[in-house]
Image: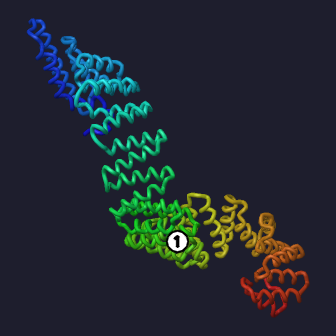
Amino acid sequence: MKLNMPFVSPFQRVIFVLVAVLITFSTDSFAQKKKKSNREERKIREATFYFTEGVKYFILSEPDFDSENMDRALMLFKKSLESDPSNSTAHFKIATILAGRGDLDNALNNANKALELDPENPYFYTLTADILTRKSNFAEAAQIYERMLGNLEDTDEYLFDLAAIYLYQGDYEQGLDVYNRAEKIFGVNPEVIRAKQQIYLKLNKLDKAIAEGEKLVGAFPGEAAFVMSLAEIFVSNNREKDAIPHLEKLLEASPNNPEARLMLSKIYQRTGSDKKASQNMEEAFANPDLSLKLKLELIAKYIRELPNNETEEMLHALTDQLIETHPDEANAYVIKADFLNAIKDSEGARDNYLKSLDFEETNFNVWQNLLTIEFQDLQDTESVIKHSESALELFPNQAVLYFYNGAANSVSKNYEEAAYALEQSKRLANNDELLKYSSMYLGDVYNELKNYDKSEQAYEAVLKIDPTNDYVLNNYSYFLALREEKLSYADKLSTRLLELNPENANYLDTRAWVLFKKGEYKQARKLLEKAIEKNNKSGVIVEHYGDVLFKLGEVDQAVKQWMKAKGMDDTSDLIDKKIADRKLYE
């Protein structure tokens, strides 16, 4: 049975019809002729010779139909026609060659002539229809097929070509009619049913499209693909509940069908049956026949829907089920970690990222996610150093790995190691954001190493990218003030800082300390009093306030503030000596 036969090119038909052509040529053109004159016999022999030679060169041109042999074949077929103009097959061959070369007008003339000379040959009809189709003359092509189907027996298989032509024209009703004719001859056919469904859907005849689907399900009971196709039509047209009985019946017969479980789960989720949705989803995920890739894609989709309490509960079950079903698959642990990271379970996310690395250590994204969680969320600098070093053995040219290693070493006061890693990060950085953060940490690290020139260069590199970076404006101006260097520049930086953050207690303290170093104690006092209003638990701010009071001659009040600061964090090493001696030490 031939189904939905495409419009094949004339060249593609040649091999199938070659034997028929030769037989047709010999019988139709010669065998039925009566006794002829010697001249006529000579003409016939010439025609036969040229035609046979033409077929030979035509075959030699295959499979690529090279132009030289095809030129010879075309010339010989034309010579054959000169000797016998009534040879329909010669016209057919010429039409075939010309159509293959895109000379459709002349090809059509020869195809029409072949059909005129021999209206009983189905190949002549199909070639003519092919050429008309390529010329977008669909209506005429349809007429050719209709003529053939009406005149010749055993051509019913071309109903599918005819239906396709009607659909090309957008004549859906005629297309349906032809498919119905084919169905009466060949019986219920899945491809025909699907084609009819598409037509009915385009015509907004949903009930008829559904009826065709139900016909197919009835004709092929137990065929899961047909049930799924019907269910998809229901779902696509907001009739999810109508799909449920079909899917449940399918699952009664085939309970291990994961695709049906997934579709049923989606339908139950849409219709508010969350418990049934979760049950079917979990059963689908427990099936090892359902591809891991699809499972991962579905979980990733649900993760994007967070926060949602029902979705979160389902994802806990699904990711656990995924690991249980695929315990040796790294990506099962990765997606579990992604989910836990999304719901801020940083410890759980870290554990699963680490577990995934036991199975696949070359996933760079996993290393990056792991380090981000450990550094930003868990602030576990020891683990960051350890894992960044392991990652760098695998990815020695990744700037972000050097950054995390350098930042963690900086926090851990391993300044030499931090400087090396951050310089590597800066060298390899391929974006301004990473360059900026590497330089920020380098500014602090070089300050601790007392390499002040490099510290300032690093800070300036940040401000070049981000002139309003409050972290650098704060540290840069504060460190300059501590060293009592470039106080006018520190004044400029701290002024910009406070303009951008007028209510920040730490930045008020920094600005006040710059003023203190410049000897502007009254202005410093006002800023520190405002800072203490914002944060009276900061030891450094309270201690600085005592220092300013001392400079203003209020020694008793200064000692009182130093004593307050002593019970707080971040005070200087001189706090006890200040209190004991009632004297300012810097």
In this view, 23 is above or below 531: above
In this view, 281 is above or below 170: below
Residue drawn where x is 34% and y is 31% of the image: 162
Residue drawn where x is 80% and y is 90% of the image: 563
Say which amino acid is labelled 1: Glu
Instruction: Please state the horizontal and vertical placement of residue 190, each as a whole percent of the image.
Output: 33, 45
In this view, 155 is above or below 197: above
Residue drawn where x is 24% and y is 17% of the image: 75
Q: Secondary structure at mark 1?
A: helix
The image quarter in which residue 456 lies: bottom right
Colour logic: rainbow
Q: Nearer the viewer, residue 241 or 29?
A: 241
User: Going by the picture, which residue comes out furthest to the bottom?
Assistant: 580
The image quarter in which residue 496 lies: bottom right
In the drawing, does residue 380 fall left or right of residue 504? left
Instruction: Please state the horizontal and vertical placement of residue 417, each as a whole percent of the image.
Output: 56, 74
Q: Nearer the viewer, residue 301 or 151?
A: 151
In the drawing, does residue 418 fall left or right of residue 474? left
Instruction: Please state the horizontal and vertical placement of residue 105, each as a whole percent of the image.
Output: 36, 19
Q: Quadrant of the C terminus?
A: bottom right
Q: Nearer the viewer, residue 274 or 110?
A: 274
The image quarter in which residue 227 lies: bottom left
In the drawing, does residue 449 fall left or right of residue 200? right
Q: Quadrant of the N terminus?
A: top left
Residue tagged 1: 313
